[in-house]
Image (cartoon, rainbow, N blue to C red):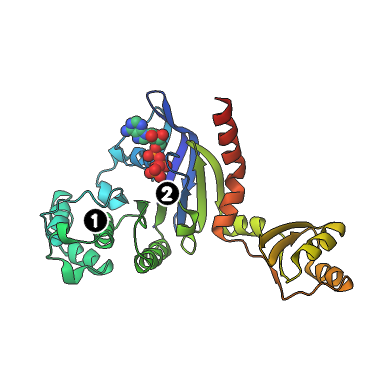
Amino acid sequence: MSATIEIRGLCKAYGQQVAVDDLSFTVLPGQVTGFVGPNGAGKSTTMRIILGLDALDAGSALIDGRRYQTLRSPLCHVGALLDAAALHPGRRARDHLLWMAQYNGLPGRRVDEVLEQVGLTSVARRRAGTFSLGMRQRLGIAAALLGDPGVLLLDEPVNGLDPEGIQWIRGLLRSLAADGRAVLVSSHLMSELEGSADHLVVIGNGRLIADTSVSSLLAAASGGRVLIRTPELSQAITVLANAGATVATTDREAMTVSGLAAERIVAVLAEHGVRVSEVSTHRASLEEAYMELTRDAVEFGATAAKEA
Ligand SMILES: Nc1ncnc2c1ncn2[C@@H]1O[C@H](COP(=O)(O)OP(=O)(O)OP(=O)(O)O)[C@@H](O)[C@H]1O
């Protein structure tokens, strides 16, 4: 599989409300691309446009180099989970998938294969209305996988799931990417993508903020910071600040220090008789990296709101 999604100069407004503003990015095969941004950033609009459910004002959104509307068997190119709640409550899970398969000219055996893949075989004859949110998400994903597509779009698939469900989705996303599929998964919480995304497309107010690999984002955010834990925090802060370090406290006994190597920090504190209970190189979480990345955009938003 080597399918891609290519978004170029995409623009969309609803009346005066700009939803997507000159957005460009590419979703590559073989990796999970996280599509991240706060509520209202334009993620769902972009996904709906990719799927031909909404018209674009300018630019292009292509799957395998083609517009969705021109794909001959769309389910075999792209599978999507947009709204897991949008299921007929009276329809049995298996019948729902059989109907979809028939309507799209797909073999009936795919239904049992995808039910197995998402772990719903034992409840396949139950009505969708009796399903928990987690089961509905699984059924929605089963539907997305029916045509064995090279591209998958999942809009907030872990929203409202319990930790076990989140763990399951993470594993599934990883295995779908390992098959060589291009997987685009949206979330407004960066932490939900920790452990599953390889690449991130971050948007705010419909505009691109970052298009980066997770590893380079984390490396940049971790950049040379050292975590120090000490029962003599205020003394340590003074000593390190005088030595030229930049210090930020994280709780009553801990701080992150930048601008000095770990060995130098330990030596300076020892020279001044400051006791230290922990020294470690700081590894940023994806959430911290995201906060750092979006700080400027958020500050810009706050300033703009104040000025308006
Ligand atoms: N059908 C619509 N009519 C009018 N405005 C809309 C419509 N759909 C989206 N918008 C507006 O476009 C902007 C982008 O919304 P969108 O739903 O794409 O964001 P999102 O990033 O998916 O947010 P969320 O995380 O809340 O789902 C928002 O300001 C929203 O109010």
Question: Residue at coordinates 50% horizontally, 47% vertically from top-left?
Answer: 201
Q: Residue 268, percent across and down? A: 86, 68
Residue underneath mark 1:
143
Q: Residue 77, percent across and down? A: 31, 50
Q: Is residue 209 above or below residue 166?
A: above
Q: Residue 121, percent across and down? A: 19, 70
For the residues labelled 1 and 2, the Cα–Cα distance comes to 20 Å
The quadrant holding residue 286 is: bottom right
Q: Residues within 10 Å of mark 2 (few under 14, many from 20)?
A: many
The quadrant holding residue 231 is: bottom right
Answer left or right for 112 relative to 308.
Answer: left
User: As rendered, which of 193 and 1 lies closer to the eye?
Assistant: 193
Question: Is label 1 in a helix, a strand or a loop?
Answer: helix
1 or 2: mark nearer the eye: 1
Q: Is residue 153 above or below residue 274?
A: above
Of pointers 1 and 2, the one earlier in the residue sequence: 2
The N terminus: image quadrant: bottom left
Identify residue type, mark 2. Thr
Residue underneath mark 2:
4
Q: Residue 203, percent across and down? A: 50, 42
User: As rendered, which of 64 and 264 lies closer to the eye?
Assistant: 264
Question: Residue at coordinates 41% horizontally, 53% vertically from top-left?
Answer: 185
- Which numbered circle lies on residue 308? none
Q: Residues within 10 Å of mark 1 (few under 14, many from 20)?
A: many
